[in-house]
Image (cartoon, helix red, strand yellow):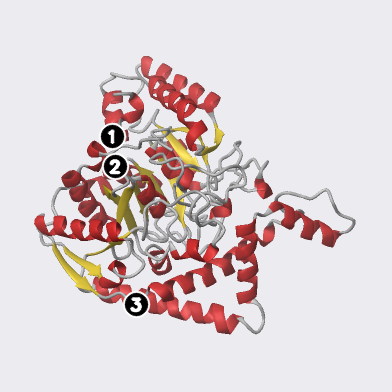
Amino acid sequence: MELYEFTVHELIEKLDKKEITSSQITESYLKRIKEKEKDVQAFVTITEDSAKEKASEIDEKIKRGEKREKLEGIPIGLKDNLCTKGVKTTCSSKMLENFVSPYDATVIKKINEEKMISLGKLNMDEFAMGGSTEYSYFHPTHNPWNLNRVPGGSSGGSAAAVAANMVPWALGSDTGGSIRQPSSLCGVVGLKPTYGLVSRYGLVAFASSLDQIGPITKDVEDNAILLNIITGHDEKDTTSVKREKVDYTKSLVKDVNGLKIGLPKEFIGDGIDEEVKNALLETAKIYESLGAKVEECSLDIGKQALAVYYIIACAEASSNLGRFDGIRYGYRTEKFDNLREIYINSRTEGFGPEVKRRIILGTYVLSSGYYDAYYKKAQKVRTVIRNEYQRLFEKYDLILTPTSPTVAFGIGEKSNNPLQMYLADICTVPVNIAGLPGMSIPATVNSEGMPIGIQLVAKHFDEETIFRAAYTFEQKVKFREKYQPKFKN
């Protein structure tokens, strides 16, 4: 096996035994990037020189007999909306094409404290608005399982890079499914943590009450290891929650005996692909065979959740992106005769069509005369959705649903039909609206060899139960041992 094929916990073991060096790991991934980036196009910026330099410094330190930290010398990929000091942070937008961050996001600071090695910034839908990574200003990202298909989005670059073994793991952000959906479509593990568990300081905001940073990894154990690093209260983020630190790796036990799992009938009905539905039902049978109790239940919130999500998300996007005006932040047009034209032309030229669409919709629902009818009502329905989840969690430990209603679709298939693209979020957006934790884990592949992911959702701050159930399922089905991306057209 090549070094880039190993999981992070396997690489840590080899580093501990001094069987390999950090430079060897880093060189292996950089070589892989050079081989596959032309096909996958997962990166916006590759930090090859700094990665090699940092790996060499770590190896010299170890030669001197100094102690190596657990994750020291392990590479990582970073979604390009995480502010990284001295490195471009573009959000895959012309608006920030040349922006070099003067500071590190809190999660980046935590990564640096562990002495991990960044391989670069990963492609995404512009300002995290999209579900396919086709809306990047730079280039679309391709799915390693089939290069003619999308990897999902907006963290498509992160998921594709992990699936293609171009990074051992990555950080993404999830506003309405942007970690879980691409993880499902690319056959990797993606977790959206409970809102407030991970600091959002330094994450370029899309929708502040929905955004959450989380890990995308090759397996469940790696996911728990990375979540351990990035959690914790942050005084710089007022939504960051003070909680006792948890070691999520302690939840990695093969035991779901007695676990109660709810299977909402609405998520196996119309709109869900037949093979996805079959994979979900087979997953339920596997959990039952392992000792869990799976029951059909009702969670009739799908249509309401989509409407609520696109009202709230667009309203917050309109507010958050108001700062990018050619004066305070971002791209400035060269075509202007007065201040008004700077504003208009900078935003017209700097933002792509999907971002403009959401800004316009968000501004509309916040405008005088429509605020009460749309935004205020959406916030009330949001409370109803949270209460529906709470009702289910009085009876169940977990809720089991598909992650995506379909497998990865073709590039260009939905990009000109925004409504069809938005409907693809129906399984994931309710989790963000309620602020709950949710994980996508690969279950199987369909008849065309494309990955199908299933989603586990738990009550607030109960990531431990998700890890326990996900790890048990993963050890049973052994997805990574059976299936690998083909890089075919």
Q: Nearer the viewer, mark 1 or mark 2?
A: 2
Q: Secondary structure at mark 2?
A: loop
The three-letter amino acid code for the residue at tag 3 is: Asn
Q: Quadrant of residue 272?
A: bottom left
Above or below for 168 versus 421: above
Above or below for 405 versus 309: above
Q: Which mark is residue 410?
A: none
Q: Quadrant of the N terminus?
A: top left
Q: Position of residue 198 (x, y in %)?
A: 42, 54
CB contact under 8 Å: marks 1 and 2: yes
Q: Quadrant of the C terminus?
A: top left
The answer to whether residue 244 shows anywhere in this view is no
Residue occupying the far top of the picture = 63
Which residue is pictured at 78% across the width and 56% down the height?
345
Q: Position of residue 116 (x, y in %)?
A: 43, 33
Q: Secondary structure at mark 1?
A: helix
Which residue is pictured at 31% across the width and 29% down the height?
11
Q: CA distance from mark 3 to mark 2?
A: 32 Å
Which residue is denoted by mark 2 in the rendering?
219
Which residue is pictured at 36% across the width and 28% down the height?
4
Q: CA distance from mark 3 to mark 1?
A: 38 Å
Which residue is denoted by mark 1 in the rendering?
9
Q: Earlier in the sequence, mark 3 or mark 1?
A: 1
The three-letter amino acid code for the residue at tag 1 is: His
Q: CA distance from mark 1 to mark 2?
A: 10 Å
Which residue is pictured at 52% across the width and 55% down the height?
236
Q: Earlier in the sequence, mark 1 or mark 2?
A: 1
Which residue is denoted by mark 3 in the rendering?
387
